[in-house]
Image (cartoon, rainbow, N blue to C red):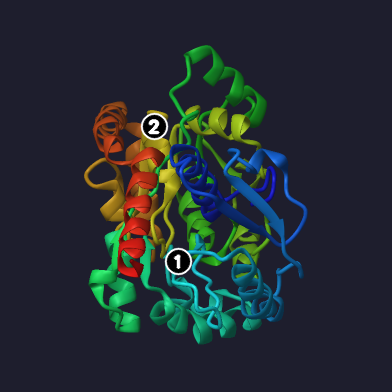
Amino acid sequence: MIKDKLEGIGWFTYENLRRITTQHPEHTFYFLFDRKFHPSFIFADNVVPLVVPPQARHPLLYYLWFEFSVPRVLKKIGAQMFFSPDGYLSLKTQVPSMNVFHDLNFEHYPQDLPRAERRFYRNYFPEYAFKARRIATVSEYSKQDTVKLYGVDKDKIDVVYNGANERFVPLDEATRMATRKKYTGGAPYFLFIGSLHPRKNLARLFPAYDAFKATDTQGVKLLIVGEKKWWTSEIEDAYNSMQWRDEVVFSGRLRVDELHHVLASALATTYVSYFEGFGIPIVESFYCDVPVVTSNVTSMPEVAGDAALLVDPFSIPSITDALQQIATSADLREDLIEKGRERRKMFSWQKTSERLWCSMEKLIEQID
């Protein structure tokens, strides 16, 4: 957890540990940080923060941190259990452990990751799957994927789903117009939110939007929110090949309040990844009364249900057709918004934290 730099797994960690620690004052929770932490992450008096070197932002350092630093600290504090919110575990510790597998994208699309990261994940995550006494996943898809790829007993995996930031609510028309003016000169826009990673499928979203613009009469722009951390030559080529690339707006990373305004002011969210373990922007869009275009593969149909327009993420014409439908049909947009209001009731961080805590209790019962 790094202040003002939370993304999917970071938000999962923040939202769930904030609730679990404050709602269970009978327990003491030790938070292990690999660097100086922000005090806002210490949610209650029963949270004890510990800075454990070295800073782990490289596969070699992952190994050193989890196999040497973490076991030493767990032994020192007499930990009853070790919980890892992002999949990694310590193979050396004897402390009963539980982790969260958000997705196994590196098994399906290893070419999307740098070589060192890819080798680390594919070597150690199968071992983490067997080391864990319990595993939580964020979708039924990810659970079945873990069972299939790693041969894990399905009975030790609990599906907890994800939630949405509770600040994400619909906006009034004046605020929406002011937000559009700030980011797109007042034009309506399709919105993409996420890290600019290959699996987010910008390499197909760009040409699909370009084809949409050939018949667009409303001046709809495409707003891209996220850092270019994983920007590849394939994405670059797709962008540079666009006839309408001047209609694409890059905002970079946004703070939560600005992200809320941008999302709640969008004509529609375009979330056409070819692999996701969940897809938090889908649910955040439901909470903001914004229609969604998303993919018909992996976890996304499970999350979206009938409340989104589903496309084949490998087909540029399929994505283009959905953009045209959603831009030209107010009735379709309203229908999707109404279905999203119903669908969003399934997902909240409070429900996630309760499911996660229930999974933790199962582990404690196994120990006892």
Q: Is residue 124 above or below residue 83?
A: below
Residue type of the residue flagged with mark 2? Tyr
Task: Please tell me in which quadrant of the rendered image residue 224 appears.
Answer: top right
Left or right of 190 on screen, residue 58: right
Question: Which element is circle 1 on?
Answer: strand
Q: In this view, does 201 lie above or below 269?
A: below
Q: Position of residue 16 (x, y in %)?
A: 47, 46
* Cα distance between the residues tagged 2 and 1: 28 Å
Contact between marks 2 and 1 (CB within 8 A): the answer is no
Residue type of the residue flagged with mark 1? Asn
Q: In this view, does 153 lie above or below 351?
A: below
Near-viewer residue (69 or 123): 69
| Sequence order check, earlier mark of 2 and 1 | 1
Residue 287: assigned label: 2
Q: Mark 1 points at which residue?
A: 99
Task: Please tell me in which quadrant of the rendered image residue 97 appears.
Answer: bottom left
Q: Where is residue 51 in the image (x, y as percent from the top left)?
A: 73, 59
Asked whether the viewer can see residue 250, the reply is no
Q: Where is residue 92 in the image (x, y as percent from the top left)?
A: 56, 83
Near-viewer residue (259 or 41): 41
Residue 29: assigned label: none
- Please name the residue shown 64% across and 31% down the image: 183
- Please name the residue shown 61% across and 63% down the image: 77
Q: Where is residue 52 in the image (x, y as percent from the top left)?
A: 72, 64
Question: Which element is circle 2 on?
Answer: helix
